[in-house]
Image: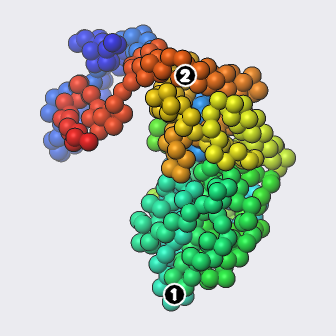
Amino acid sequence: MSRTIFEKGAEGRSGSFIPANDCPIEDLGFEHPREGAIGLPRIGEQDLIRHYVELAAKNYHIDKGMYPLGSCTMKYNPVINEEVAKLAGFGGLHPLQSEDDTQGALELMYELESDLCEICGMSAFSLQPVAGAHGELTGMMIARDWFRRRGEDRKTVLVPDSAHGTNPASVVICGFTPKTIASNEAGLIDPEVLAREAGDDTAVLMLTLPNTLGLFEKDIEKIVKIVHDAGALVYMDGANMNALLGIVRPGSIGIDIMHLNLHKTFATPHGGGGPGSGPVGVREHLAGLLPVPRVVKKDGRFSLEETDEESIGRVHPWFGNFNVLVKAYAYIKALGGEGLREVSENAIINANYLMKKVARDYDIKYPGRCMHEFVASGRNLKQFGVKTLDVAKRLLDYGLHAPTVYFPLIVEEALMIEPVETEKKETLDHFAEVMAKIAKEAAENPDILHEAPVTTPVRRLNEAAAARCPELSWSGLECVPMEDE
Ligand SMILES: *Cc1c(COP(=O)(O)O)cnc(C)c1O
């Protein structure tokens, strides 16, 4: 068991040389509220570096191997984007600097917004929301105000059962009532079912496109018409727009409101809580409702304006996560229109290639053509007493990250696999081979799978306890005991 950095340190050690103070000590006229040392680890620089290198080596990350987490789009993030985001003119900005000082940053936001409009066929985007789910909430607030201003009291938001889990949550937080639309046997929305549900009380259809089964709604035009005929709006969760770049422009098919996940589709390292960016785009009729301030260009000069009285207001301090915007901008400009289309084409080709290979050993409930991801099922291994969780844990023993498991809920023992466009054929082949090997182990020696992982720094954890009751022995935090389940 490796020790914490606190245990590795000892009194008197230090990794820095701060010269003795040679300035007069000023009395600032107040007592410092801190009493005594704050208990930082005392450690030399070499041990400090070794400590973090050791930790990094234990970790699994995108620069170590394939990361097939469905829906999360864990693709390679070009390092040049980091360099660009670090440029002093971007990285060193203060949000209170004047508009004259920040013309370049404002221009970048202005151009990024117009690129996103071009890519998505929308009229305007707000770059303020800082996550996909935050974009969803912002979009729902826009819908709420749209109906409020028209004097319409619509309460229901239709959400297909193939939607991302954050969708119904955003609906509830915004004060609407979600109503589930069951998908048909092809994993898609049935226009007839939708037509029965859509009515005077429907405010929005909130659909994830492609849906969480990795499928594109082939009846999207009919679907949009049904919703519009009912006087409602269509919201598209475009977090996985990496399947549609240069192929489908949501605005052109009648989507009224959408969000993007810049940290997925446009390559920002993410996971572990951020930073993210979930811009919201709308068509013309809703543009006035977008959050303020908006970046405006007049006579070649950029400014921030808060004038639109219809606006739902601010949804985040300052301008969102600006460094993510810089990375998305760099990514879009580097690839251009053709390059972005190739991103999506390769994402789709990779997912379909891998699906065919994985289908030899695992059930595929919706075996048609998928988009950027597919959902396999470990249902066929239940006869050996093996669960999807066991498969996921065994993958770690073979040096691979597990896919998303047990989601979407409409697939039993789900394994949601997104290989992303940046992985080469050999990597996909290797993943499929390991999956095949695990299926064979399940039949021949299921106990190995129940014990997995055996090669990782820690064995199988109680994941709920690890989150709710972390062992932070140095912190003095009290553990909140788990309730019996
Ligand atoms: C990731 C994802 C979200 C949530 O995005 P966050 O940035 O994690 O809030 C929403 N919808 C879909 C389809 C997603 O894949």
Task: Find disc 2 in the rendering and name its residue.
Answer: 443
Of label 1 and label 2, which has the lower sequence position? 1
Mark 1 vs mark 2: give the one in front.
2
The image shows a total of numbered marks equal to 2
x%, y% of residue 198? 58, 78
Q: Is residue 59 above or below residue 145?
A: above
Task: Find disc 1 in the rendering and name its residue.
Answer: 152
Residue found farthest to the front: 383
Q: Sort mark 1 into few (<14), some (14-19) or many (20+) by Cα contacts within 10 Å.
A: some
Q: Quadrant of residue 358?
A: top right
Amino acid under label 2? Ala
Amino acid under label 1? Glu
x%, y% of residue 360? 69, 30
Taking the spot 80% from the left edge, 53% from the top edge, the residue there is 246
Q: Secondary structure at mark 2?
A: helix
Q: Secondary structure at mark 1?
A: loop
